[in-house]
Amino acid sequence: MGNRLTNLQRFYGLMAELDGRVSGKRYLRDCQGRMDWPMRGVYFFFEDGELRSQSGSGPRVVRVGTHALKAGSRTTLWKRLSQHKGVARSGGGNHRGSIFRLNVGTALLDRDGLECESWDNRQSNAPCEVRLAEQPIEQMVSGVIGAMPFLWVEVSDDAGAESERGIIERGSIALLSNWEKVPIDPPSESWLGNQSNRERVRASGLWNSNHVDEAYDPNFLDVLERRVEQMGWRG
């Protein structure tokens, strides 16, 4: 626990540095594609009411993600964020294109005692009438995710599994995850993720499924630090 606590303190020190360099966290509900997004990067979501209890003070990271990890992928950072945000016009979205939206939706369904049999069906396409019936849940998900403050760091290297984006994402998730470990900065009792039907979400304390059960290589923090320091100050 000692080394992990030290590494978490370093990680959150870098989050504080990043916060200053991008002039503060943004909310997806207020974001659009014309803002000054880098082409590629890694994002870190926080959540109201979810505070660190051991590594220091302030909010804890509840979700880490990136994009374009497959060779040849052209997905941009904003494209990935917009998939999580949903559709501004309707307030809805497509949880089949965002595991983040899927996980938040399953927790909302359980918390509010709602039923939507098609929600957890992983088929990539669904008939129009199914999507229409899911729209109220999609709107709830957009409200929850849109209210989460987040940071982002530019990592504009080539798409591929060995991208530094992948190194930062995997390392951050594995470090933050409480899966089968002595918990550090555990979620609050009221955290929505506690209602998830995904054991990986509940046990890790993150809205992530991949990498929560992996060991982390602390060297990823050197990569993250270098990328944070490359972010120019904005004022």
Image: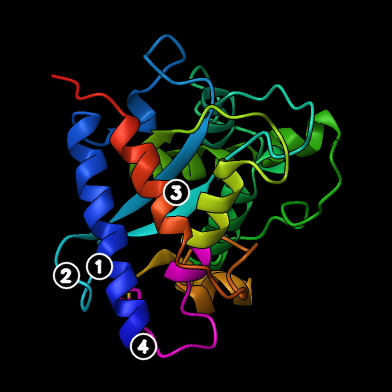
- Three-letter amino acid code of the residue under disc 3: Val
Which residue position holds label 1?
Answer: 9
Earlier-in-chain disc, 2 versus 3: 2
Earlier-in-chain disc, 1 versus 4: 4
Q: Of tags 3 and 4, which is closer to the observer?
A: 3
Inter-mark Cα distance, 1 to 3? 16 Å
In the picture, the disc for residue 223 is 3
Inter-mark Cα distance, 1 to 4? 12 Å
SS label for mark 2: loop
Earlier-in-chain disc, 2 versus 4: 4
The quarter of the displayed image where residue 185 is located: bottom left
Dot 1 and dot 2 residues touching (CB under 8 Å): yes
- Three-letter amino acid code of the residue under disc 4: Met
Inter-mark Cα distance, 1 to 2? 7 Å
Instruction: Report the quarter where the N terminus lies.
Output: bottom left
Which residue position holds label 4?
Answer: 1
Q: Inspect this view and state whether residue 207 appears.
A: no
- Three-letter amino acid code of the residue under disc 1: Gln
Q: Position of residue 217 (x, y in %)?
A: 52, 68
Earlier-in-chain disc, 1 versus 3: 1
